[in-house]
Image (spheres, rainbow, N blue to C red):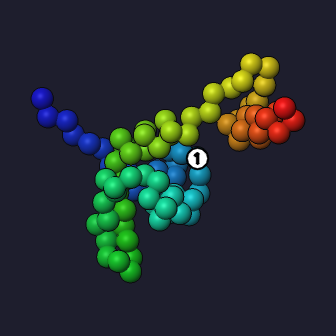
């Protein structure tokens, strides 16, 4: 069976991750999405396509699991509280 990979543009990826498109571009520059990212534009005006598998791998590597006893409404709040609890320990 043939597997077809879905690719996302920078704005689509930003929308999926809930971040600014500039954040996605910075992560692309740092090569955080791996080597499967495709540039269909030019060097001066890149037009990136990010595979869904790269986005899923990036999310899996950064998954935050809640600690027992830490209540948070967002992932950012959970990270701050976890870092604070770790610093106090």
Left or right, 34 with respect to 81, comes to left
The image position of residue 28, as x and y in percent, is 46, 60
The image position of residue 43, as x and y in percent, is 35, 77
Dot 1, crowdedness within 10 Å: few (<14), some or many (≥20)?
few
Image quarter (top left, top right, bottom left or bottom right) of the C terminus: top right
| Image vertical order of residue 67 relative to residue 19, above or below | above
79 or 73: nearer the viewer? 79
| Image vertical order of residue 52 relative to residue 48, above or below | above
Residue 3 seen from this side: yes
12 or 32: nearer the viewer? 32
Q: Residue furthest bottom?
A: 44
Residue shown at 47%/54% (left/top)? 32
Residue shown at 21%/40% (left/top)? 4
Residue shown at 32%/76% (left/top)? 42
Residue 81 seen from this side: no
| Image vertical order of residue 45 relative to residue 72, above or below | below
Q: Quadrant of residue 1?
A: top left
Q: Which residue is mark 1?
A: 18
40 or 86: nearer the viewer? 86
| Image vertical order of residue 69 relative to residue 13, above or below | above
The image position of residue 76, as x and y in percent, is 71, 41
């Amino acid at each position: 069976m043939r597997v077809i990979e879905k690719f996302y543009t920078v704005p689509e990826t930003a929308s999926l991750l809930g971040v600014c498109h500039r954040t996605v571009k910075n992560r692309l520059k740092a090569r955080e999405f791996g080597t499967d990212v495709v540039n269909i534009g030019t060097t001066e005006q890149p037009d990136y396509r990010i595979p869904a598998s790269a986005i899923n791998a990036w999310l899996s590597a950064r998954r935050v699991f809640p600690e027992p006893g830490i209540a948070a409404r967002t992932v950012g709040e959970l990270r701050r509280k976890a870092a604070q609890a770790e610093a106090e320990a």
